[in-house]
Image (cartoon, rainbow, N blue to C red):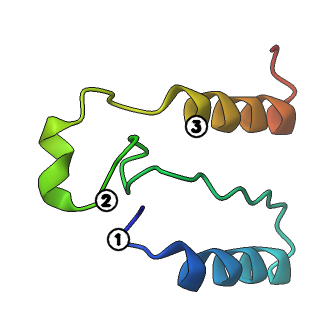
């Protein structure tokens, strides 16, 4: 539900560019989240203040697990 950076348009490009530059990339499409990684209904900016969750727990877990796997950090 990210209306600022549309996933269909941007995710494949990001993956291609990072891989093309020799980077390591893992791509996940996180359904139902807005640009701020909050669970959203509409995905519009005017909805941001009404969402009580600051950052989706599942997204945070996915991102932190990836960082740990890349840096050899403890789980």
> Quadrant where the C terminus lies?
top right
The answer to whether 19 is drawn above or below residue 64 in the figure is below
Lower position in the chain sequence, tag 3 or tag 2: 2
Query: Which residue does the numbered mark 2 point to in the structure image?
Result: 43
The answer to whether 39 is drawn above or below residue 25 in the figure is above
Label 1, label 3: how far apart the Cα atoms are:
18 Å
Lower position in the chain sequence, tag 1 or tag 3: 1
Few, some or many C-alpha atoms within 10 Å of disc 3 (few <14, some 14-19, many ≥20)? Answer: some
In the figure, is residue 32 to the left or right of 60?
Answer: left
Marks 1/2 in contact by CB < 8 Å: the verdict is yes
Which element is circle 3 on? helix
In the figure, is residue 3 to the left or right of 29?
Answer: left
Few, some or many C-alpha atoms within 10 Å of disc 2 (few <14, some 14-19, many ≥20)? Answer: some
Residue 59 picture location, percent across and down = 58, 37
Which element is circle 1 on? loop
> Which disc number belongs to residue 59?
3
User: What residue is at 87 percent from the left and 27 percent from the top?
Assistant: 72
Which element is circle 2 on? loop
Marks 1/3 in contact by CB < 8 Å: the verdict is no
């Amino acid at each position: 539900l990210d209306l600022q950076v549309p996933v269909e348009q941007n995710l494949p490009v990001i993956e291609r560019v990072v891989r093309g530059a020799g980077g390591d990339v893992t791509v996940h499409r996180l359904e139902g989240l807005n640009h701020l990684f909050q669970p959203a209904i509409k995905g519009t900016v005017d909805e941001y203040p009404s969402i009580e969750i600051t950052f989706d727990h599942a997204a945070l877990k996915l991102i932190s697990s990836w960082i740990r796997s890349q840096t050899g950090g403890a789980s």
